[in-house]
Image: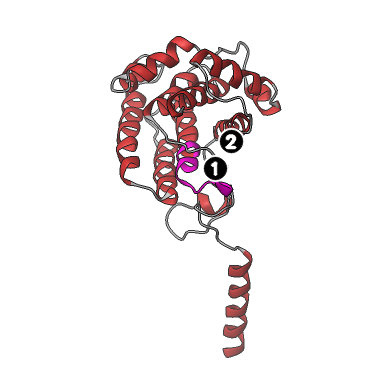
Amino acid sequence: MKNIHSCTLIIAFFVMMSTGLVSCSSDNDTTNSENTNSNSAKLITTLPGNDANPYDEVGWLYNELFDTYYTNANLGGSVTQIITKVQTIADASANFNSTKGSPYHNVSSTRVLYLLEHTTTCVNDVISASSMSTTGKSSLTNFINSFIIFLENENDCDVIYDKVVAYENGVLLNAALTETDKRIILTTTSITRHSAFRARKKPKKNTDPDWDIFIGNIIASTEGAEYGSAEAATMSLVTGIAQND
C-alpha cells in the first residue's frame, strides 16, 4: 500500500509540474489556469476564452482586430477615421470575413457618437430597442450595470473572468431565455470578458496600450450583436478606441 501511495504522489507531482500555472498578470498574453472552484472553463480553455460560450469566436475576433489596430502607427483620429481604419483591418482578416453575414452592417459614426455622449442612458436605450424578450432585456441590463460597478473595485483579472463566466453559465441554463436572447447576451459577454481581461492584465513588455473598459465599449457590442458577431466586434472596438483615445 505504501508503494502504491508513493507512486500516486509522484504521478500527481509531475502532472502538477507539467500544467505550469501562469498568472494573468504575467508577460504571457494567454495562459491555461487550473482552479478548483466551480468554474471549470479555465481547466480546458486558453484565457480569456470560455469554450462553453457558443459565441466566443467573437471575443477572439475582437482581440485579433484590437492587436492589429494597435500595432499600426497610424492611430486615433475622429470617429469616422477610426471606423475606416478598423474596417480596413477587418476586411483584411480571414476570421472577420468568415464571421460576417450578408448583408454586413457598417459601423455608424452617428451611433458611436450617441453612445459616447449618452453614457448614463445608453444601456437602457440600446437594450430596450433590441429584439430580446423582456426577460433577456432585464437580465442583460442588470448584468452590464452591475459589472461596470464591479470593475471599479476589482483589479484581479481572474476574479473578473470568473464573474463573467458564472453569468454566462446561468444564461446557458436559463430556459426562460430565447435563442435570440442567448445569442445577443453571450456575444456581449464574450467581448466584455476579453476586453476586461485585457484591461486588467499586465501589458506584455509595456507595448500594449493602456486600456480601460467603458460602458460604451460593452453596450456597443450589444448593439452590433443585433445584426451579427462581426458587427458586434467592430462596433465595440471602434467605440472602445474612441473612448480610450
Identify which amino acid the numbered label 2 is placed on.
Answer: Trp
- Type of the residue with mark 1: Gly
Answer with left or right where residue 121 lies relative to residue 177: left
Q: Residue furthest bottom?
A: 2
Residue 46 percent location from the top left of the image: 58, 48
Q: Mark 1 highlights which residue?
A: 49
Label 2 crowding class (10 Å Cα cut-off): few <14, some 14-19, many 20+? Answer: some
Please tell me which residue is depicted at 42% across the width and 54% down the height of the picture.
Answer: 38
Image coordinates of residue 36 in percent, x first then y, are 46, 61
Could you give the CA–CA distance between mark 1 and mark 2, rounded to whole angstroms? 8 Å
What residue appears at the point 57 percent right and 90 percent down from the top-left corner? Answer: 2
Image coordinates for residue 153, horizontal then vertical, percent: 31, 45
Using a 10 Å C-alpha cutoff, classify the residue at mark 1 as few (fewer than 14 neighbours), some (14 to 19) or many (20 or more): many
Residue marked by disc 2 = 60
Nearer the observer, 17 or 180 = 17
- Front position in the image: 128 or 147: 147
Q: Is residue 18 above or below residue 61?
A: below
Q: Is residue 158 magenta?
A: no
- SS for dot 2: helix
User: At which x and y percent is residue 111?
Assistant: 43, 13
Confirm whether residue 46 shows in the render.
Answer: no
Residue at image coords 33%, 35%: 148
Would you say 132 lies left or right of 88 here? left
Prevalent SS, magenta region: helix
Question: Residue 132 sits in which quadrant?
Answer: top left
Q: Which residues are magenta?
A: 194-206
